Amino acid sequence: MILGLSIPLLYGGSGLFQRLSSFPLSLLGVVLTMIFVGWNFNAGRLRLMLSGIGHPMAQKRALATVMATEFAICATPAGSGGPLTYVFLLRRHGVSGSSAAALYALDILMDILFFTTAVLVIALTLFIHPQQLQVGWQLALLAALLFGAMVLAWLAARHYRSTLMWASQGLRKWHVSPARRRRVLRTLLRFRHGLRLTLAMSRGRLFAIYLLCVGHWLMRYSILYVLIAGMGRHISWAYSFLIQMLALTAGQFTMLPGGSGGVELSFTALLAPVLDHATLGAVLLMWRFTTYYWYLIAGAPVFALFAGKALWQHLGNGAAKQAVAAQATSTPS
């Protein structure tokens, strides 16, 4: 967090605070409302998926699940705590572990489908308005990554036997014990079964889930455009969308919570040609506050209430069992 905060403060200089003081507080309220609406879109998406497999959930509980998961994503390296929290909370709701993992996978696939579509639309927009074609190679890279992810997911589901064999060979190569290998492969089979059950939902339900996914991401990725407009500057919405995609993608490679450092540096490099130092620093600080720090502030009490203590106990019990097993295998007979 210190690294992430230092970059906009150093880059913006003394003029940063003057730019911040001129930003309308009412517009900040609009941005935070957009985030809350986006969370509710995600909660609605979760409710549709759960009711599709016979486990309906109330809107408040779904919203709490979304906020706790978002907090875990922001608070852990590369968002690794997100899937664990999501599956854990759904299991407490009565969903099997494999079905919960399948729902998370469907969630991710919907996101990938949205971003692939968005990249294609943005590419068309930038070719119609070629003044920002300097981002062409970044756009092509994003499109290739998203398309590759979709192809890999389809191939893994289509040729699951080969996937299981490859996973087994990899686990054996990494000297994973036979018992744990069987447990991993059994989990993959259950996951595939759960994913098939999930995708057996009606097309109307899947389309509604996708529409809520679109609503969430449009809210989330319109924030930068609104913040820059509040500073009295203007860039195209498509370019602001692309900047956020590239910055957040680059942040994943730092393996730090929230992509700290990588996100800020990428963001600064992409917006430096169109904004002065003070404005860019102020926009970066406000964007990170609303899309990262606010997720931690608002999500922390929800996570603590719904997942914190029970999840830490679950992780502690798992670590204790692993330690006992390791001690048993290392003790000579």
Image (spheres, rainbow, N blue to C red):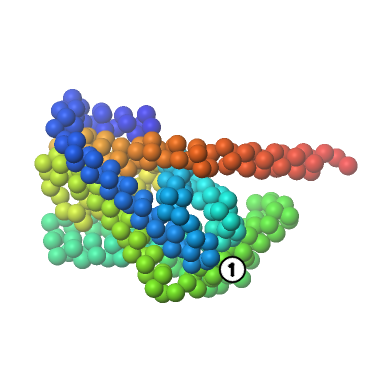
Image-quadrant location for residue 214:
bottom left
Specify the quadrant that holds the N terminus. Answer: top left
Q: Which residue is mark 1?
A: 193
- In the image, 180: left or right of 148? right
Percent position of residue 205, x then y: 41, 70
Where 282 falls versus 73 (above or below)?
above
Element type where label 1 sits in the image: helix
Residue appearing at x 14%, y 65% in the figure: 128
Q: Can residue 156 be seen from the camera position used here?
A: no
The amino acid type, in three-letter code, at marker 1 is His
In the visual, does 278 lie left or right of 79? left
Task: Where is residue 202? Give x, y as percent.
Answer: 44, 74
Which of these two is toward me, 186 or 148? 186
Residue 36 visible, this angle: yes
Residue at x 26% of width, y 33% of height = 8
Q: How many marks?
A: 1
Q: Residue furthest right?
A: 333
Badge 1, how many Cα within 10 Å: few under 14, some, many 20+?
some
Looking at this rendering, what residue extends furthest in the top direction?
A: 14
The answer to whether 132 appears left or right of 60 in the picture is left
Q: Nearer the viewer, residue 170 or 222?
A: 222
**Where is residue 96 drawn, in percent x and y?**
60, 59
Give the residue at x 50% y 73%. 200
In terms of image quadrants, where is residue 125? Answer: bottom left
Quadrant location of the C terminus in the rendered image: top right
- Name the residue: 34% across, 34% down: 4
Q: Point out residue 294 in the picture as x, y percentages from the top left corner.
A: 34, 38
